[in-house]
Image (cartoon, rainbow, N blue to C red):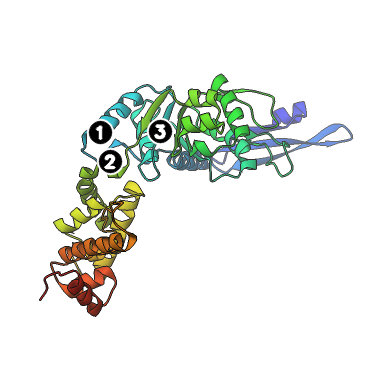
Amino acid sequence: MDLTLASGEAIYGYNWRANGRNMIASSIPIIQDGQVIGVFAHSVFLDILDAKEMIENLLSQINMYKREISTFHQAKYSFDDLIGSSQEFIKLIKIARQIAKHPDTTVLITGESGTGKELLANSIHNRSSRSSRPFIRVNCTAIPENLLETELFGYEEGAYTGAKKRGKPGKFELAQGGTIFLDEIGEMSFVMQSKLLTVLQEYEVERVGGSRPIILDVRVIAATNRDLNQMVTEGAFRQDLYFRLNVFHLEMIPLRAHKEDIAILIEHFLKKFNVRLRVDIKGISDKTIKSLEHYQWPGNVRELENVMERAMIIADMEGSSMLSRRHFGFLNTAFDVPVSLNQTQDLKTITQDFERQVIKRAMQEANNDILTAAKLLSIDRTTLYRKLKKYNFPFS
């Protein structure tokens, strides 16, 4: 206070002891006609311990927000979530584990929808030395074309009408030190492909409306269910970008190509959904597993996961502890009976042969119970009787 009176300058945040208490205070000079005529002093905190407590609370909140941000941008899956024991599957996972050890190598993951491309990308990140850093997923189909550039590269304040004050970092910036996962890369427009190529060539990004390049330290993992090589041939995908992305290629296997893993996956989903749905489904009949193994699974593992969840809910609703074919409604019309075309047969004969095979399969699935078989075929019992007689099936 005396220093403020002598110098005429305000002093903030100094220790001040009064009435036996340590306080943090500030002094502001009172000036009249250019002369210091007094000092206004006030305590910021009545006790320095109050300041310490407030700072600790602020630091605690900051750390909490940091943890939330870290969790939000964290890879959710590991190699333990990729289930399978077939030779092809094990070989794929072994290679992926090896490539995870090279944290700067760009990876291209291809495969049909539902095969687990995102799980593999998560697993590679979590297995790498970048695992403690962000994992940023960008779905190239979910972001409108006119917003994709600013989402990927960010923008500076005033870059365009409505731009946030102080600008916004892009996904590449958010992924610094970690991994950026570009999902559905095959859907990216040709213009954006050119801009992405520049970033991957220089490993630096410049915000929209900015003039300062930002050096990047990220691993790029891209994924697509399209044939990029064919797209390059058709002129729909840049060849130079394809070469940049295709440093190391991993192809996910469709479920129909490793059907021996279906039983293992079913067991995995039984455990998973018993916990999530809070139900107690003990198992699944061998016949039903065989039926599921005959299905072609166009939606791959994702489809199997979805139908398992639905079947377990249906079984729980009817009080059943075992899954059977009736809990998988789609199987009732998915007998997967092959039709072979023969030039000596007309359409009527082919149709009758197919109908005969479908009825035979339905009767086998129903253990020759006509009512059950009729339900599987979605026809009434009388109609099934008539068709059994027509095709000379034995029944009682």
Q: Could you classify mark 3 by the number of other residues whose Cα lies within 10 Å: few (under 14), some (14-19), or many (20 or more)?
A: many
Q: How much space separates mark 3 and mark 2, taking CA atoms?
A: 17 Å
Kind of residue sitting beneath label 1? Glu
Tell which tag, 1 or 3, sits nearer the viewer. 1
Instruction: Indicate the position of residue 39 as horizontal and vertical percent values.
Output: 74, 37
Picture disc at residue 53: none
- The residue beneath circle 2 is 257
Picture disc at residue 88: 1
Give yes or no for contact between labels 2 and 1 (Cβ–Cβ under 8 Å). yes
The local secondary structure at tag 1 comes to helix
Give yes or no for contact between labels 3 and 2 (Cβ–Cβ under 8 Å). no
Q: How much space separates mark 1 and mark 3, taking CA atoms?
A: 16 Å
Instruction: Indicate the position of residue 191 as horizontal and vertical percent values.
Output: 63, 33
Q: Work out whether residue 161 can be spotted.
A: yes
Task: Identify which residue is drawn at 71% across, 44% down.
Answer: 162
Q: Earlier in the sequence, mark 2 or mark 1?
A: 1
Instruction: Indicate the position of residue 267 as horizontal and vertical percent values.
Output: 20, 50
